[in-house]
């Protein structure tokens, strides 16, 4: 935004956290109470990974604040009928009237019991992707905590459409909810569809630009040339959803085509499960006395427990061993003098068929290219080298593999996550400088930092909070409508777990329940904030129809949109520049967010609220007071439900539990507690300090970017390559579900393999669609994919004109990206309006011709097809979401699916053609 001729009267500290690539710390220049300019907070340059710069989305916040289409007063629905074809008849209301209506519903609901006849919470809530909503919703999480059980299983695309397998398996293997290269130290990055130049925010762009400047090579493997591909040294146009074959062939090269000593043999012996002996039934051979897995000691020539001091375990080989094998539900087999192979040996045999020549026919990539990529990976690994970080000597392995979201979710996600992580283990490059790193923890506890969650578990591996599968411990009923604690052991049961369960099953069940699970019920009250599932989920028509049947929906509303069109009450909360909140920053958090500092940052109001909009903390306090939960609400704030615990060993700034506190009083206590936390109680500066400085940090040791030191200190191993624990829980889960009469999850049970096999994923998709919709897949000849836009992120800025103007300068926005050869065969030219159809639905958009896409592939950017959101609905921009089915057959064992669908294309006629004019 441009500046006025008047002098700036003040500059207010704030942050942009509209996507998980944040926060970016910024200043808002204000003239006569009006924000006029967003600029970087220069004082953050020394602590921020992007040296204080801010992302393009931040510059749209002034226009967002002054949007003439904003909801400026509470609104109450007057038409009891809901649906896209219904006029809601919203009428303005006072805050008292709106809150009385909402709280009356909540009190009535509470009086009936917190859970309904199916055992589900009567109150549900859905929030925007990646947890970004919590940095704008003030103390509302404390209200939800005070309420009790909340069902968050009605997703809006996050989780099941995200980096889902990476989230779950990553946390299981190396505390990595998200995974990133050690970009400042890496030499080679092999990216399978990871579009970091669009999704990594300003920090990612800066870190990768610096990396290229010092000579880093990135190989981008994906069906279309993304922004990231365009910034890479090589683009490998792989056939959609065949990435596992490429990676399995890379493993083949490492295990069968190079000398074994080029791998990190010491790392494999000491920091992985490679030497563990596998008994005849597929489980580890164990010591009869301790039940510890056995290894073959080359020094003594006998099998010994894995943690025996002074041993030299055999990496490969077959040995005659006696011991006990423990299977599902503690079933045991006593073995005398039986032949056992090491887990590594089994891996070598398993990978033998998957040569580059085999993969070439599947991926449509030359075998030589696959082999060359694998050898480059090994050549850049620097096996045997070390580096010192903060006085700690660690392996130095400057090579990493990144996975994109369609690669790491849905069928094939397990295979890709396993192969990527295993390749890091083979060269000793997992959680070490230069290599493949996890960035944050969401499922394991405590979640304050990754090192804290390195807790010893069974068999020399880290503990993991699996949902129980053993007989007598299994959860036959789940507190969520997608049954994540019943169906998904890896989802765990943390506050984040519901968002990572199979959220599409919650929507699907509203139409038709699943046999032998509790009867599906809608929530009595549904809260919605910063999310629009009628646009952002799959099969958007079905989602909209389900929402229309919800009895009472409360949306915290910025403008009208496709989801709050079905709401009963709209509440206008303060936007990004109007509200007050303190958040944690720094440490290691989300992909490229590696900081050498950690602390807190303030979002200070730069503008008075527009109309009757209210601060979210004020709204939460009023709800708590009127429902009679003020004491529980304040107690939740004191315990840290709003992001900062208000007491510690040397300080206590707790709120009086029974009193009503103002917004500034609450955040002043939070600021004081934050100062005390950072100084171990020595200082306690409050809100005014943060208003003056904007943020406060302390150094974060760089060695804590890496899990290796914590693993080595506790003598722990990475649970790779052989997945004995997954094999066991899969068999237990199958037994429990069959005891319940559930057989419709049997396809998912097949994914619980100790060593994953390759699946023909394209054929799997095609057959599932043909069976479910009774179509001929040949009538849908193109694979349709989606890609991230840095400007729009998840589509939350689709209604802002400035963001649209910026995005229009980036190739690929606004239409259907298509290969010119494919277009010529259909008689299509640049700009022609086309209809894109799948067995589920149809959309239309303008053709964008690009050579950087395979002829069998189409691409659409982001989440659009709006019909209600102001400005966005006039863009006539297509989206794939309405074309993708919610399908049990296309749901993998972790509960995710992929943004992938087969479609047909034809030149638009009638209304669709006229829409482009």
Image (cartoon, rainbow, N blue to C red):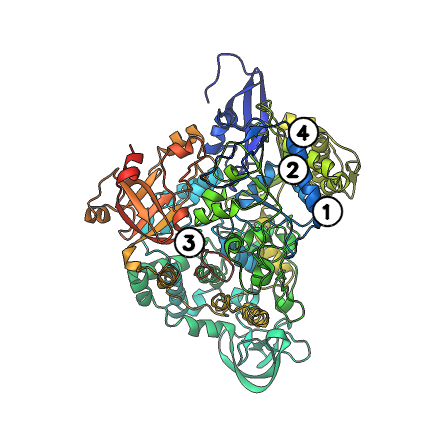
Q: Nearer the viewer, residue 896 or 651?
A: 896
Vertical arrangement, residue 775 with respect to residue 442, above or below: below
Determine the residue positioned at 40% across, 67% down: 758
Q: Using residue 897 as the reference point, say whether residue 45 is left or right of it.
A: right
Q: Nearer the viewer, residue 225 or 808?
A: 808
The answer to the question of whether label 1 and label 3 lie on touching residues, with beta carbons closer than 8 A, is no
Q: CA distance from mark 2 to mark 4?
A: 10 Å
Asked if residue 364 can be seen in this view, the reply is no
Q: Residue at x 30, y 60 (%)?
A: 776
Sequence order check, earlier mark of 4 and 1: 4
Q: Nearer the viewer, mark 4 or mark 3?
A: 4
Q: Earlier in the sequence, mark 2 or mark 4?
A: 4
Q: Nearer the viewer, residue 336 or 902?
A: 902
The number of numbered badges drawn on the structure is 4
SS at mark 4? helix
Residue under label 1 = 111
Read off the residue under disc 3: 885
Local packing at callout 4 (Cα closer than 10 Å; few below 14, some 14-19, many 20+) is few
Mark seen at residue 96? 4
Q: Position of residue 710 (x, y in %)?
A: 62, 56
Asked whether the residues under the numbered discs 4 and 3 touch, taking CB atoms below 8 Å apart as contact, a structural biologist would say no
CB atoms at circles 1 and 2 under 8 Å apart? Answer: no
Residue 813, given in percent of the width and then of the height, sits at: 35, 38
Q: Residue at x 67, y 31 (%)?
A: 618
**Which residue is more in the foreground, 242 or 663?**
663
Count residues near mark 1 (Cα–Cα under 10 Å), then give few for <14, some for 14-19, many for 20+: few
Say whether marks 4 and 1 touch (CB < 8 Å).
no
Q: Is residue 576 above or below residue 108?
A: above
Q: Residues within 10 Å of mark 3 (few under 14, many from 20)?
A: many
């Amino acid at each position: 935004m441009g500046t006025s001729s008047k002098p700036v009267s003040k500059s207010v500290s704030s942050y942009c956290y509209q996507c998980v690539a944040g926060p970016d710390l910024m200043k808002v220049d204000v003239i006569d109470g009006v924000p006029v300019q967003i600029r970087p907070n220069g004082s953050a340059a020394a602590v921020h990974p992007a040296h204080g710069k801010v992302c393009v989305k931040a510059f749209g916040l002034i226009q967002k604040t002054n949007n003439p289409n904003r909801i400026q007063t509470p609104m109450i629905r007057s038409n009891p009928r809901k649906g896209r074809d219904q006029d809601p008849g919203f009428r303005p209301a006072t805050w008292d009237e709106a809150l009385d209506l909402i709280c009356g519903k909540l009190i009535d609901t509470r009086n009936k019991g917190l859970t309904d006849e199916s055992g589900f919470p009567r109150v549900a809530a859905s929030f925007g992707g990646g947890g970004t909503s919590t940095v704008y919703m003030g103390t509302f999480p404390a209200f939800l905590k005070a309420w009790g059980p909340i069902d968050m299983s009605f997703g809006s695309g996050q989780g099941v459409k995200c980096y889902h397998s990476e989230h779950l398996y990553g946390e299981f293997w190396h505390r990595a909810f998200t995974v990133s290269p050690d970009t400042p130290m890496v030499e080679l990055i092999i990216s399978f569809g990871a579009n970091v130049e669009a999704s990594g925010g300003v920090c990612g762009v800066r870190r990768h630009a610096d990396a290229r400047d010092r000579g880093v090579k990135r190989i981008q493997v994906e069906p279309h040339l993304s922004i990231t591909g365009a910034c890479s040294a090589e683009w490998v146009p792989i056939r959609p959803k065949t990435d596992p074959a490429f990676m399995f062939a890379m493993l083949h090269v490492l295990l069968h085509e190079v000398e074994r000593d080029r791998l990190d043999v010491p790392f494999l012996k000491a920091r992985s499960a490679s030497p563990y002996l596998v008994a005849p039934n597929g489980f580890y051979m164990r010591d009869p006395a301790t039940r510890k897995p056995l290894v073959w000691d080359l020094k003594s020539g006998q099998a010994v427990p894995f943690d025996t001091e002074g041993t030299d375990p055999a990496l490969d080989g077959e040995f005659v061993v006696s011991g006990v094998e423990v299977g599902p539900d503690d079933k045991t087999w006593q073995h005398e003098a039986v032949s056992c192979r090491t887990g590594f040996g089994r891996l070598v045999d398993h990978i033998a068929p998957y040569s580059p020549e085999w993969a070439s026919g599947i991926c449509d990539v030359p075998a030589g290219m696959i082999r060359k990529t694998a050898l480059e990976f090994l050549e850049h690994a620097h096996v045997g080298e070390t580096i010192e970080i903060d006085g700690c000597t660690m392996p130095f392995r400057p090579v990493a593999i990144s996975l994109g979201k369609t690669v790491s979710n849905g069928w094939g996600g397990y295979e890709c996550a396993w192969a990527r992580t295993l390749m890091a283990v083979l060269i000793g490059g997992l959680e070490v400088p230069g290599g493949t790193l996890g960035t944050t923890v969401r499922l394991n506890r405590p979640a304050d930092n990754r090192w804290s969650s390195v807790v010893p578990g069974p068999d020399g591996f880290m503990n993991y909070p699996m949902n129980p599968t053993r007989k007598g411990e299994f959860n036959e009923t789940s507190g969520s409508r997608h049954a994540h604690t019943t169906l998904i052991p890896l989802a765990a049961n943390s506050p984040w777990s519901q968002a990572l369960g199979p959220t599409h099953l919650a929507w699907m069940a509203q139409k038709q329940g699943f046999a032998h699970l509790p009867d599906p019920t809608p929530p009595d009250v549904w809260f919605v904030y910063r999310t629009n599932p009628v646009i952002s989920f799959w099969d958007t028509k079905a989602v909209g129809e389900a929402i229309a049947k919800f009895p009472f929906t409360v949306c915290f509303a910025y403008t009208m949109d496709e989801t709050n069109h079905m709401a009963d009450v709209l509440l206008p909360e303060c936007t990004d520049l109007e509200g007050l909140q303190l958040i944690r920053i720094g440490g290691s958090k989300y992909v490229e967010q590696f900081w050498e500092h950690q602390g807190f940052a303030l979002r200070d109001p730069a503008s008075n609220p527009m109309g009757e909009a209210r601060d979210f903390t004020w709204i939460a306090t009023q709800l708590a007071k009127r429902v009679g939960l003020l004491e529980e609400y304040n107690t939740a704030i004191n315990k840290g439900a709003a992001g900062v615990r208000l007491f510690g060993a040397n300080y206590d700034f707790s709120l009086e539990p029974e009193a009503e506190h103002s917004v500034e009083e609450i955040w002043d206590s939070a600021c004081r507690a934050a100062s005390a936390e950072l100084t171990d109680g020595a200082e306690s500066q409050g809100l005014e300090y943060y208003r003056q400085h904007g943020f406060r940090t302390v150094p974060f040791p760089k060695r804590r970017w890496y899990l290796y030191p914590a693993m080595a200190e506790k003598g722990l191993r990475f649970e790779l390559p052989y997945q004995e624990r997954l094999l066991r829980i899969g068999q237990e889960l199958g037994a429990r579900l069959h005891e319940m009469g559930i057989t419709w999850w049997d396809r998912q049970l097949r994914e619980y393999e100790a060593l994953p096999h390759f699946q023909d994923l394209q054929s799997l998709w095609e057959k599932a669609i043909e069976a479910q919709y009774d179509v001929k897949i040949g009538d849908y000849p193109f694979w349709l994919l989606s890609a991230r836009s840095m400007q729009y992120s998840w589509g939350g800025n689709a209604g802002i004109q400035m963001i649209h103007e910026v995005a229009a300068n980036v190739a690929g926005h606004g239409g259907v990206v298509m290969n010119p050869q494919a277009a010529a065969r259909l008689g299509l030219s640049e700009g022609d309006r086309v209809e894109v159809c799948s067995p589920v639905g149809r959309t239309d958009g303008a053709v964008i011709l690009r050579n950087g896409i395979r002829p069998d592939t189409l691409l659409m950017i982001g989440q659009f097809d709006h019909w209600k959101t102001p400005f966005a609905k006039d863009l006539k921009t297509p989206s794939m979401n309405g074309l993708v089915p919610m399908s049990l057959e296309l749901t993998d064992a972790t509960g995710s699916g992929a943004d992938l669908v087969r479609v047909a294309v034809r030149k638009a006629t009638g209304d669709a053609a006229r829409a482009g004019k």
